[in-house]
């Protein structure tokens, strides 16, 4: 197989591997001659496309031709441009969504059931700084306390960040919501909230956002109030370790899983292999009664109507419209273009316009109905597929997914990245060469879909891996100790 035509109505196909000029490639019941070298992941015209006409991929327009394009020519940024512009008036036109099967066989995993009924996929001790001023202290405490790990405790982790002070309005609110979300996250068996004492988002303020808490599970330390913050911090961490070390994994239904869906560094195969297999996984988990969360709103632009029309009712549709338009207004309020995507790496991998990227990106949502829409920092409450307000930035969006309740994040990539979020972040390669080259980053290879495997084949394997990871299997980023957290910056810094 040299090219893949995703939809029968497409006038472009995607090269699975580099194709030389003059090669004859099969498209359905005919052959066409390749008129230019086509890099892997890039598009080739399978029919003539006149200037100003739509270029069709995934069955939808991904932009318009900026020049006449011959059959067999390379289609990319030199002859294709976005057709997106400004705000759009949307109307609710419900479409058929995947129906839950009546004969679904329940599957289980082994998780840590917390007193409030939530379930963790890890039993970790988390150190949450209220302000960036104590990041160094948090790092020292993490290193020292890691030597005390015992029993079922998986790790001690400090989630440092530069915020918590010199912030105003929504910007400060975001920090408080995200930090309190992590204090309450079920992957943490114990939490040390580490404050300085003079910050805007100090411990007393944060307690209002945390709500009720178990004093055995959550400890607080204000560094300005003690003589030796390392000594006092270690005392509290020792207590937390003693409290959490005897927790045991128990069997629970997969319906207790909340999984975040994110992509980054996409290539031309992402929308054919990695993203569709995550979408099929999402449908399978939803059938089990589980929950998935799709985010990176700017990478819905150009494909947003597909999600809007899968809304379970008009209320969810209207919230999805607000989700999209509010992000467009955010760009405009900063004087920035709405459609400043794709990135240089995306373009190198074969993605030409934002529509091209978005239609591939939304493949991760599968075909289930959209059950809920979340504001940034809001905890998920609706089972099924949810949409979350967050930007496309990998670290910010993945952090937002974890803060909203995801115990695991699935991260698809055609370029590769080593980062991880505060929860296990499973890296899924869109192509086999990447999976082979960066086996220390990649946990799952979706590349065989472009070779000889079906999406269903790979979705079953991905479900198996997710259940294993939820039950304690360590993935690459955990083995190497990679952890990242990034809060969405919105506003001035004092």
Image: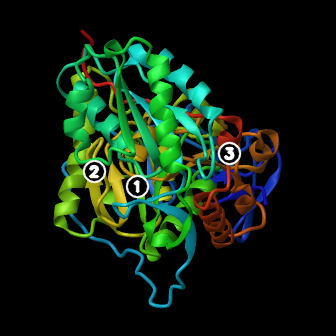
Which residue is denoted by mark 2 in the rendering? 374
Mark 1 or mark 2: whose residue is earlier in sequence: 1
Q: Name the one closer to the observer, 440 or 152.
A: 152
Mark 3 or mark 1: whose residue is earlier in sequence: 3
Which residue is denoted by mark 1 in the rendering? 293
- State the SS at label 1: strand
Look at the image and tell me in which quarter the C terminus lies.
Answer: top left
Image position, residue 366 (x, y; %): 47, 64
Image position, residue 201 (x, y; %): 25, 24
Q: Name the one closer to the observer, 43 or 236.
A: 236
Q: Which mark is residue 68?
A: none
Q: Name the one closer to the observer, 301 or 184.
A: 184
Marks 1 and 2 in Cβ contact (< 8 Å): yes
- State the SS at label 2: strand
Disc 3 vs disc 1: which is toward the camera? 1
Mark 3 or mark 2: whose residue is earlier in sequence: 3
Which residue is denoted by mark 3 in the rendering? 41
C-alpha span from label 3 to label 2? 33 Å
């Amino acid at each position: 197989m040299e090219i893949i035509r995703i939809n029968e109505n497409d006038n472009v196909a995607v090269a699975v591997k580099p194709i030389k000029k003059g090669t004859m490639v099969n498209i359905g019941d005919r052959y066409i001659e390749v008129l230019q070298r086509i890099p892997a992941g890039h598009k080739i015209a399978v029919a003539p496309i006149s200037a100003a006409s739509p270029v069709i991929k995934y069955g939808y327009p991904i932009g318009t031709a900026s020049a006449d394009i011959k059959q067999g020519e390379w289609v990319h940024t030199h002859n294709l441009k976005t057709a997106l512009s400004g705000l759009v008036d949307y109307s609710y036109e419900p479409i058929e969504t995947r129906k839950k099967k009546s004969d679904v066989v329940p599957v289980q995993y082994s998780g840590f059931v917390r007193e409030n009924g939530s379930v963790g996929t890890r039993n970790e001790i988390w150190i949450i700084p209220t302000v960036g001023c104590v990041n160094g202290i948090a790092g020292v405490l993490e290193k020292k306390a890691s030597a005390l790990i015992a029993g079922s405790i998986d790790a001690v982790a400090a989630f440092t960040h530069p915020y918590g002070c010199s912030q105003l309005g929504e910007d400060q609110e975001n920090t408080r919501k995200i930090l309190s979300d992590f204090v309450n996250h079920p992957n943490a068996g114990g939490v040390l909230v580490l404050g300085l004492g003079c910050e805007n988002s100090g411990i007393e303020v944060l307690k209002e956002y945390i709500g009720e808490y178990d004093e055995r599970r959550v400890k607080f330390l204000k560094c300005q109030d003690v003589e030796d913050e390392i000594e006092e911090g270690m005392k509290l961490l020792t207590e937390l370790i003693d409290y959490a070390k005897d927790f045991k994994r128990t069997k629970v239904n997969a319906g207790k899983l909340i999984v975040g869906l994110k992509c980054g560094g996409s290539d031309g195969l992402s929308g054919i292999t990695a993203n569709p297999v995550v979408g099929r996984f999402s449908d399978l988990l939803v059938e089990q009664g589980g929950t998935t969360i799709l985010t990176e709103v700017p990478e819905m632009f150009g494909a947003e109507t597909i999600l809007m029309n899968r809304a379970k009712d008009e209320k969810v549709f209207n919230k999805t419209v607000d989700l999209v338009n509010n992000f467009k207004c955010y760009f405009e309020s900063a004087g920035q273009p709405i459609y400043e995507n794709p990135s240089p790496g995306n373009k190198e991998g074969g993605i030409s316009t934002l529509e091209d990227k978005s239609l591939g990106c939304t493949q991760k949502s599968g075909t289930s109905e959209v059950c809920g829409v979340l504001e940034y920092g809001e905890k998920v409450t609706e089972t099924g597929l949810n949409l979350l307000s967050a930007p496309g930035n990998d670290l910010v969006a993945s952090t937002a997914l974890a803060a909203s309740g995801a115990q695991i994040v699935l991260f698809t990539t055609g370029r590769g990245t080593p980062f991880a979020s505060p929860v296990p972040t499973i890296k899924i390669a869109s192509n086999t060469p990447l999976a082979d080259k960066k086996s220390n980053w990649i946990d799952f290879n979706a590349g065989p879909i472009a070779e000889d495997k079906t999406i269903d084949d790979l979705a079953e394997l991905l479900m198996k891996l997710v259940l294993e990871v939820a039950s304690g299997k360590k993935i690459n980023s955990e083995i190497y100790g990679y952890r990242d957290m990034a809060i969405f910056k919105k506003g001035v810094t004092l």
